[in-house]
Amino acid sequence: MAIRNIRTDLSVNDKAYYCTFHRGIFVDTAGTVTKLSGMYMGEGNLEGFYDIAQNPNNHQHMVVSNLDHVNSARAIGLSESFDGGKTWRPSASGYSGHRAVGFWFNPDDENDMWIM
């Protein structure tokens, strides 16, 4: 499994998220690793995940950047969760069609996100 990025959870000390190429997003809680389910992966199901971020003002709000390598024109973009990663949907941010390799929430404004 090729890990692209690792982010620690902002509210749980022994919890981290791993973005992987072709395998999905995994969460490690005190050494127990599970795959996040319900992730939007596009039609090709050969997903690549580049980054995951947790809103510092609302830890239940998470965003992940994804790329479907088969149907890339339709599935490049961001997916969001508002329940701590239990369910996901394509982002309503309007950001699609471009690969996002990293992003951060503005700690002073939960509605402001920086994307690169």
Image (spheres, helix red, strand yellow):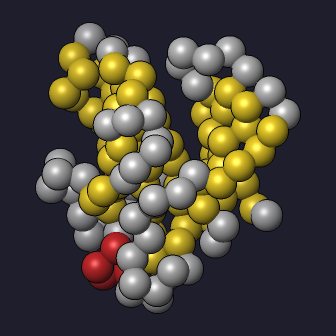
Residue 106, percent from left and from top: 30, 21
Q: Which quadrant: the N terminus?
A: bottom right
- The one of 61 and 103 positioned closer to us in this rendering: 61
Residue 72, percent from left and from top: 38, 80
- When the figure is inspected, residue 8 is found, relative to residue 71, above or below; the finding is above
- When the figure is inspected, residue 107 is found, relative to residue 93, above or below; the finding is above
Q: Is residue 103 visible?
A: no
User: Left or right of 89: which side holds 44?
Assistant: right
Q: Quadrant of residue 49?
A: bottom right
User: Left or right of 53: which side holds 6?
Assistant: right
Residue, x 19% and y 27% (percent of image)? 111
Residue, x 58% and y 25% (percent of image)? 9
Q: Residue furthest right?
A: 31
Q: Is residue 87 visible?
A: yes
- When the figure is inspected, residue 46 is found, relative to residue 80, above or below; the finding is below
- The one of 22 and 103 positioned closer to us in this rendering: 22
- The one of 34 and 103 positioned closer to us in this rendering: 34
> Number of marks in the image?
0
Residue, x 37% and y 53% (percent of image)? 88
Q: Residue furthest top?
A: 108
Residue, x 60% and y 61% (percent of image)? 24
Residue 42, percent from left and from top: 39, 76
User: Left or right of 104: which side holds 22?
Assistant: right
